[in-house]
């Protein structure tokens, strides 16, 4: 993958526009992921392969971010940008990893929801299979 990229889900709105503007001075590319792309592997979305996938019957409307190829300082600056720009955080976010790169957006979304529920109830977050990285 070339430059750092942030994939935006369900953020084609004023909040998403503000988030994209926040990324410009940080030299972070952003891309809105369309619902038609949700069935593609995350690695394909991150690399911009452009393959089309059939639109599955399932869907989700939660805002979600997938951070691809950011360095530690870039990640820190991105997260600090939310506070600096008074943007409420996006609850579902993950980093593209070797573990999740072959997942589709539906699996990532389900895993992030599972993690959020586990954290809220005090249960162990990750099982042997791996984590989303978020």
Image: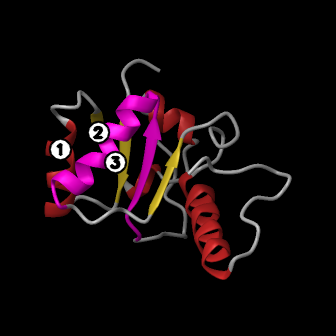
Asked if the magenta segment contains residue 123, the reply would be: no
Residue carrying label 2: 30
The reply to whether dot 2 and dot 1 touch (C-beta < 8 Å) is: no
Most foreground residue, 82 or 95? 82
Q: Residue furthest top?
A: 2
Q: Quadrant of residue 97?
A: top right
Q: Which residues are magenta?
A: 62-86
Mark 2 or mark 3, which is nearer the start of the sequence? 2
Residue 22 disc label: 1
Residue 117 picture location, percent across and down: 62, 76
Residue 79 disc label: 3
- Left/right placement of residue 9 relative to residue 17 reads right
Label 3 to label 2: alpha-carbon separation: 15 Å
Which one is in front in this view, the residue at disc 2 or the one at disc 1? Answer: 1
Label 2 to label 1: alpha-carbon separation: 10 Å
The reply to whether dot 3 and dot 1 touch (C-beta < 8 Å) is: no
At horizontal 24% and vertical 56% (from top left) the residue drawn is 83
- Left/right placement of residue 1 relative to residue 106 reads left
At horizontal 57% and vertical 60% (from top left) the residue drawn is 106
Label 3 to label 1: alpha-carbon separation: 10 Å
Q: Quadrant of residue 118?
A: bottom right
Most foreground residue, 45 or 69? 69
Mark 1 or mark 3, which is nearer the start of the sequence? 1
Q: Is residue 51 visible?
A: no
Q: Which secondary structure, mark 2? A: strand
Residue 130 disc label: none
């Amino acid at each position: 993958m070339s430059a750092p990229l942030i994939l935006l889900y369900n953020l084609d709105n004023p909040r998403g526009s503000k988030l994209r503007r926040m990324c410009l001075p940080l030299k972070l590319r952003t891309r809105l992921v369309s619902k038609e792309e949700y069935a593609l592997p995350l690695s394909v979305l991150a690399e911009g392969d452009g393959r089309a996938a059939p639109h599955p019957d399932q869907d989700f409307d939660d805002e979600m971010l997938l951070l691809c190829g950011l360095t530690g300082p870039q990640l820190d600056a991105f997260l600090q940008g939310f506070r600096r720009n008074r943007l409420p955080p996006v609850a579902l976010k993950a980093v593209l990893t070797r573990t999740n790169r072959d997942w589709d957006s539906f699996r990532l979304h389900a895993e992030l929801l599972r993690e959020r529920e586990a954290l809220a109830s005090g249960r162990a977050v990750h099982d042997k299979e791996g984590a989303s990285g978020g």
